[in-house]
Image: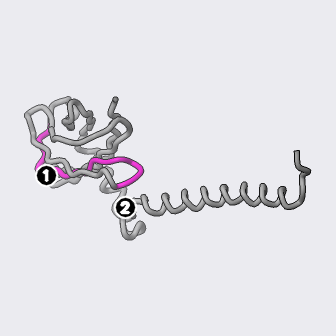
Amino acid sequence: MAPLTGRKVFIGMASAFGVIISVNLFLAYSAVNTFPGLEVKNSYVASQNFDSDRAAQEGLGWSVSAQVTDDTLHLNIDDAEGRAVEVADLSATFGRATNVRDDQTPAFVFTGQDYTAPVTTAPGNWNLRMVARAEDGTEFKQRVVVLVNP
């Protein structure tokens, strides 16, 4: 066995730190490239109507849930009495919480009991970011977590 020299110690330490720095650079690069962007352009302006918008939304008394079965997204919007709500307008984005690569815009159809749309999924955690408009014009925004089982 060859003796431990300063040169060998230096190469070992430089290699270890090189791996650590390389991994950190890769993770930083991945974090920046998968960031989906800002929710609003100016958070101060958006906050000015937050309380009144929230009160109007809560006044509707809607409850929302979503699930995926057989590549079909089912969105349930129920009123305070548990009856299905048919909204005046509905738009949504369905995708992963961590990046926008898998984002989809479901084309919902009201079935009388719920809204359905075909989607392409994989197992894991998905988010449905929906905006619905009531018949009286009240806007209802919600992010619904959807767990897709393998």
Helix, strand or loop status at disc 1? strand
Query: Can you give x and y, in whole percent of width and height, for residue 110 in the image?
Result: 9, 39
Residue hosting label 2: 39
Question: 119 and 93: which one is in front?
Answer: 119
Q: Quadrant of residue 81?
A: top left
Structural crowding at the residue carrying mark 1, measured as other residues with C-alpha within 10 Å and reported as few (<14), some (14–19) or many (≥20): few
Asked whether residue 56 is in view, the answer is no
Residue hosting label 1: 89
**Pointers 2 and 1 in contact (C-beta within 8 Å):** no
Q: Residue at x 51, y 62 (%)?
A: 29
Structural crowding at the residue carrying mark 2, measured as other residues with C-alpha within 10 Å and reported as few (<14), some (14–19) or many (≥20): few
Q: Is residue 27 magenta?
A: no
Q: Residue at x 22, y 53 (%)?
A: 139
Q: Residue at x 8, y 34 (%)?
A: 112
Placement of the C terminus among the 4 image quadrants = top left
Query: Can you give x and y, in whole percent of width and height, for residue 111 in the image?
Result: 8, 35
Using residue 14 as the reference point, say whether residue 60 is left or right of it: left
Query: Can you give x and y, in whole percent of width and height, for residue 26 in the image?
Result: 55, 59
Question: 90 and 140: which one is in front?
Answer: 90
Asked whether residue 93 is in view, the answer is yes
How much space separates mark 2 and mark 1, taking CA atoms?
21 Å
- Check disc 2 and give the amino acid type: Glu
Q: Quadrant of residue 6?
A: bottom right
Q: Residue at x 28, y 40 (%)?
A: 121
Residue extent of the magenta highlight: 85-100
Asked if residue 147 is positioned above or below residue 101 in the image, the reply reads above
Query: Can you give x and y, in whole percent of width and height, for residue 25 in the image?
Result: 58, 62
Lower sequence index among marks 2 and 1: 2
Question: 10 and 34: which one is in front?
Answer: 10
- Check disc 1 and give the amino acid type: Asp
Asked if residue 67 is positioned above or below residue 30 in the image, the reply reads above
